[in-house]
Amino acid sequence: MGGKQPDGPGALRVSRAARPEGTRVQVGPVEFGGRGFVVMAGPCAVEGATQVEHSAAAVASAGAHVLRGGVFKPRTSPYAFQGMGEPGLRLLADAGRRHGLPIISEVMETAQIPLMEQHADILQVGARNMQNFSLLRALGKVRKPVLLKRGLAATLQEWLLAAEYLLDGGNEQVLLCERGIRTFEPAMRNTLDLAAVAWAKQHTHLPVIVDPSHATGEPSLILPMSLAAAAAGADGLLIEVHAKPEQAMCDGHQALTPSAFENLMRRLPAVLDAVDRHLLRPETPAQIAGAR
Amino acid sequence: MGGKQPDGPGALRVSRAARPEGTRVQVGPVEFGGRGFVVMAGPCAVEGATQVEHSAAAVASAGAHVLRGGVFKPRTSPYAFQGMGEPGLRLLADAGRRHGLPIISEVMETAQIPLMEQHADILQVGARNMQNFSLLRALGKVRKPVLLKRGLAATLQEWLLAAEYLLDGGNEQVLLCERGIRTFEPAMRNTLDLAAVAWAKQHTHLPVIVDPSHATGEPSLILPMSLAAAAAGADGLLIEVHAKPEQAMCDGHQALTPSAFENLMRRLPAVLDAVDRHLLRPETPAQIAGAR
Amino acid sequence: MGGKQPDGPGALRVSRAARPEGTRVQVGPVEFGGRGFVVMAGPCAVEGATQVEHSAAAVASAGAHVLRGGVFKPRTSPYAFQGMGEPGLRLLADAGRRHGLPIISEVMETAQIPLMEQHADILQVGARNMQNFSLLRALGKVRKPVLLKRGLAATLQEWLLAAEYLLDGGNEQVLLCERGIRTFEPAMRNTLDLAAVAWAKQHTHLPVIVDPSHATGEPSLILPMSLAAAAAGADGLLIEVHAKPEQAMCDGHQALTPSAFENLMRRLPAVLDAVDRHLLRPETPAQIAGAR
Amino acid sequence: MGGKQPDGPGALRVSRAARPEGTRVQVGPVEFGGRGFVVMAGPCAVEGATQVEHSAAAVASAGAHVLRGGVFKPRTSPYAFQGMGEPGLRLLADAGRRHGLPIISEVMETAQIPLMEQHADILQVGARNMQNFSLLRALGKVRKPVLLKRGLAATLQEWLLAAEYLLDGGNEQVLLCERGIRTFEPAMRNTLDLAAVAWAKQHTHLPVIVDPSHATGEPSLILPMSLAAAAAGADGLLIEVHAKPEQAMCDGHQALTPSAFENLMRRLPAVLDAVDRHLLRPETPAQIAGAR
């Protein structure tokens, strides 16, 4: 599978040296890896038509660039809500279309790839599947971008080598996503490792995204960590927003309300400007329709 | 999928309370979970007919009860040896048959299940797949025992809930396996958590196995950790043994030589006797053939 | 010792609720905890008159507000350089005076307090002494500010309670300092926990400082982590700068060169401005002399 | 301070190579590091004359060799019980004398050393002080044995180098004590690292003790972990026993009752015998009096 290892000891396709100018990943009108900073937002899980529409409307009006939402949910307990599956994916895609937003959703197994490839614009690999090498091999054959979350306790080297499976398989449209690592600290869900973001930008040519929602599990920390991520050199954010967090079927405790998300979107530009970046310019729905 | 959650808040099928007498898992003549202590041994990876035969002969003559060997290898790097696949599985099964040993091998994805179910006696889920819930769901339908390794940074509760996926799916033949957790300590590959073994014995009714090879990554520590595991109440061991560790294609640095493994097998009975256990009695090949 | 616990279950003197407006710590002309952002910089260890003068001149000319330098060094090995002791402290204080900079230095034991109190403007408690409660008790009686580093594996609650020892002892001039925590990740010296900074700002009224040098151990990450710290709401930085890092007797691999430090000082204002802060205004030496 | 580093790169006084036959530490009639396995037991903290007498009587009658009890308590919160200090130490020493048991107690700072040296037979350095180098330097000058607990997140190399401070200072009577490390796992107080025990036995010549009480924080795990420690090659145990755990002022939740401790003492000999060790033979009070 894949080609042979690039020449040189330890040489990797993901290495910055392999593409010093950096990789840009294009999803319709949305470009990752340039000066434009990309915000992906939406509910943890798609729960129904009304919920996804309200959430999509809220994040679109606040200026988000991509709509997120899970339909296959990796849940610690078999008795927790496992996601709506295909019907949920259709709801998410419809909502994205209505609001001019590409969509991102998680794929948990090889068998789900054809469905996801058909409806989703970006396929997400969750932290628990970062070293699901069979899934990575299969996603190497896909012609859609893949967002690869760092594993709960994955070293930076392991994260890079997981991405290497995708590039080695032929898919170069890869986004890395730091979402917090597991440490001894009980006050937060995970420990956000922003130095990993700066490190990944230096050592690879891939865009790097930050998920402050899973990293902290605490709404009051999402704004400061989003600003810090922007200052650290991240290329974008992945944020949980729910129209009514208190009614969410999954991770509602860590979702931003629409107004908190609006506030975040208002605060980001100044920090981005300070590091010579800017929020990705909004495109008109017509342009989006044309680009798709 | 599966039934509904057992009654009571937090009630789980894996809980000791659900089966106070404990679960016994039968694999041909080998019983896990009784007074007999089970030793599974063999190479990290099946590399060829000669290697697997030599390793099988060595572990069988030393008194091992089950032959281990990987044919689908989850490797951090896409450029590392990925395992022999089906031909390797046939070699392993043949060697097991010749030496009267059931075999255990790792399954990495749902698509491999039919093949593994046909040839392997125990299907192993590796640490990196402990929360591959799609795989767990599929293995819940299998009628062969599953050995579920604890994830690299999985809490005990997450480990139990991963096993719950299997039981909820209908497969009650589950072995838990502690294989070390990831900590800050660089002197060893992982940190063996033997208190987790005693804890799992108290909180669940499932047999608990210890893998000191992956836990320590250091041959000189495997003997003391095996004895400690036996004293802590483990029901068995999973150990890497290679006829020629220095030539191994995978993890040779942590494999025991046949003579070191023999020494371990000589040392175990006294400790087991001290905790009112014993090495599982060897059966004759004829009995095994009959039981299969 | 100290008074009784403030009323209410779990009530602490360090809690934000106990002083909602926040604490300002004044050190000569330098104020911590206001809108002004404070940069403390200098060598890991004082090595001699020339070295400390060159380093002090470099950080002063780049705009640092406080001069750092260790004279009592907690070293993992008894055979490593243990610091110059009192003569080094006098060199540091002289250099600070010449360049109009207050100084900060680490105190390792109670017996060193009188000397440090005489010469240093801020007394630092290192990560390894965060729970040296005897030292904390003694520092509670001191009338100089104390910078309290978070322990290598200290929870946020433990960090706060260590600070509580100081306040309970009567010293309210306390600066918290996040310097990275110990995790499984080998690529960096520690994992910088910037969410801890935002959390500490929300839960306590104390100024919070970030030490990106010890947190990352990697000069190329100090700039992005300093900017991220500023965006996350930190009140200042503690940074290792050495005139000739390659000749340093201690931690030279993580020290910034003077020119890298100048670059950092040029980059900070824009990020600070984006979060409605600014670099603390430089004072004239005359003002400083008057304020001391 | 101390001498110069032993010859050779990385050579340490604590290395097994420096004394292949191993160090024996003699405390009155109690010898650590030989075939005899030593059990130290008693309450977390000395609380009063009755409590310490009841606890001492209980552990003595069950066969413990050394009486433990804290009088200077390093407590996370300044509002928690901080220990009885000198009066408590006298109570502990008296109880030890009455029951023919040497005593061990924790020393938190240099100023406490003269008092502890006068009354205690073994001076304990707690996990939070493992890298309190000033304290280690001072204890290097003491002529009584020191038990050095491994830090909460100390690497094995750091633990050895902390012991090296003691040996380099001139005190060769050092006992290492593994007491669990801090990991992500919330189900137990810490993660007991028994491989560290086997590793320390291989790499140093010092006796190694295990503290299963602090390691697990859970009475039901202390028996299996004590047996496992014995099987792993430990030279002894340090166990919290309280006559009435539910009334303890400190860590009562993890103390064994006298009857649970008796059961442990009955179970140890068989495991020790399996690894060619035995419980240290009890001496008569007369012999003890003579040896003191």
Image (cartoon, coloured by chain):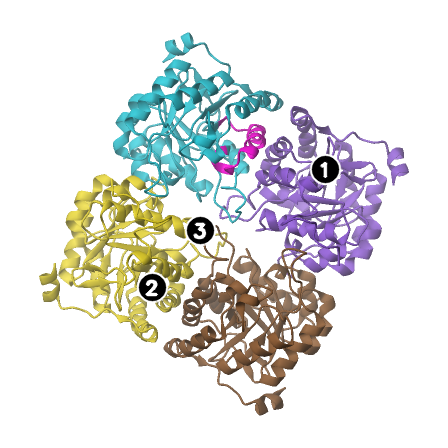
Chain colours: A cyan, B yellow, C purple, D brown
Q: Chain of mark 2?
A: B
Residue tagged by mark 3?
B182
Disc 3/disc 2 C-alpha distance (Å): 20 Å
The kind of secondary structure element at disc 1 is loop
Q: Chain of mark 1?
A: C
Q: Which amino acid type is shown beneath numbered disc 2?
A: Ala
Front residue (pair D266, D251): D251
Residue C158 visible in the snapshot: yes
Q: Which amino acid type is shown beneath numbered disc 1?
A: Gly
Task: Count neighbours of disc 3 (C-alpha within 10 A) and say few if under 14, some if 14 to 19, many if 20 or more.
Answer: many
Tag 3 and tag 2, C-beta contact below 8 Å: no
Residue tagged by mark 1?
C22
Q: Is residue B247 above or below residue A41?
A: below
Task: Count neighbours of disc 1 (C-alpha within 10 A) and say few if under 14, some if 14 to 19, many if 20 or more.
Answer: some
Res D53 → quadrant:
bottom right
Disc 3/disc 1 C-alpha distance (Å): 39 Å
The span picked out in magenta is A213-237
| Number of residue marks | 3
* Tag of residue B234: 2
Q: Chain of mark 3?
A: B
Q: Which amino acid type is shown beneath numbered disc 3?
A: Arg
